[in-house]
Amino acid sequence: MKKIIWEDDFSVGVEELDRQHQQIIEIINTLSDKPRLFRRFQNVSSALMELTNYVSEHFLLEEQLLHENGYPNLLEHSKKHTLYSNKIADLCQGSLDGKRDVPTELINFLTDWWINHILHEDMQYKAFFKEKGVK
């Protein structure tokens, strides 16, 4: 499984958001290192729960900062978070139904989504926060 390597290009210029992004990447990399964890649904469920809880906290903080600073694209950004959450729920349901190779699909989705989200979606607010003095 491919790993995400944190690079300076991933920095959104807000220390706490960068720290959270790094932690999310670390969790994803840990999951991709241990495919045998996914042999039983119970392990998938607990791993997803840890990631889901952390990501929920991250989305809440990110959206709160965007709202407090009057970010004009907050609604669209928030919709991306909702789509992510829906996809994770779908992957969980697929694992319950036994219809998918959830571990591979899950890791690929998480890796691709987070790289794209940080580099494309989150980078859209980097200059905005810099202009507002948010660090």
Image (cartoon, grey):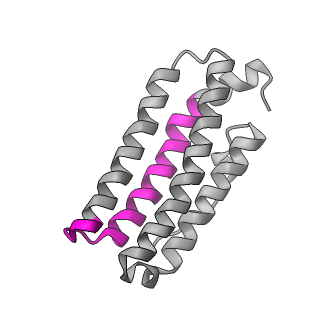
Q: Give the image quarter of residue 68.
A: top right
The residue located at (27%, 72%) in the rendering is 101
Residue range in magenta is: 95-124
The residue located at (34%, 60%) in the rendering is 92
Q: Is residue 85 left or right of residue 57?
A: left
Q: Is residue 70 left or right of residue 3?
A: right
The residue located at (67%, 50%) in the rendering is 20
Task: State the image coordinates of residue 132 (x, y, percent, origin top left).
Answer: 75, 19
Task: State the image coordinates of residue 130 (x, y, percent, origin top left).
Answer: 74, 25
> Is the residue 95 above or below the residue 17 in the image?
below
9 or 13, which is in the foreground? 13
Can you say which quadrant of the picture contains the C terminus? top right
* Marker count (numbered): 0
Task: State the image coordinates of residue 74 (x, y, percent, origin top left).
Answer: 52, 22
Q: Is residue 3 left or right of residue 103?
A: right
Q: Give the image quarter of residue 105.
A: bottom left
Residue 129 falls within the magenta-colored stretch: no
The residue located at (54%, 43%) in the rendering is 119
Can you say which quadrant of the picture contains the N terminus? bottom left
Task: State the image coordinates of residue 60 (x, y, percent, origin top left).
Answer: 60, 36
> Is the residue 49 above or below the residue 123 in the image?
below
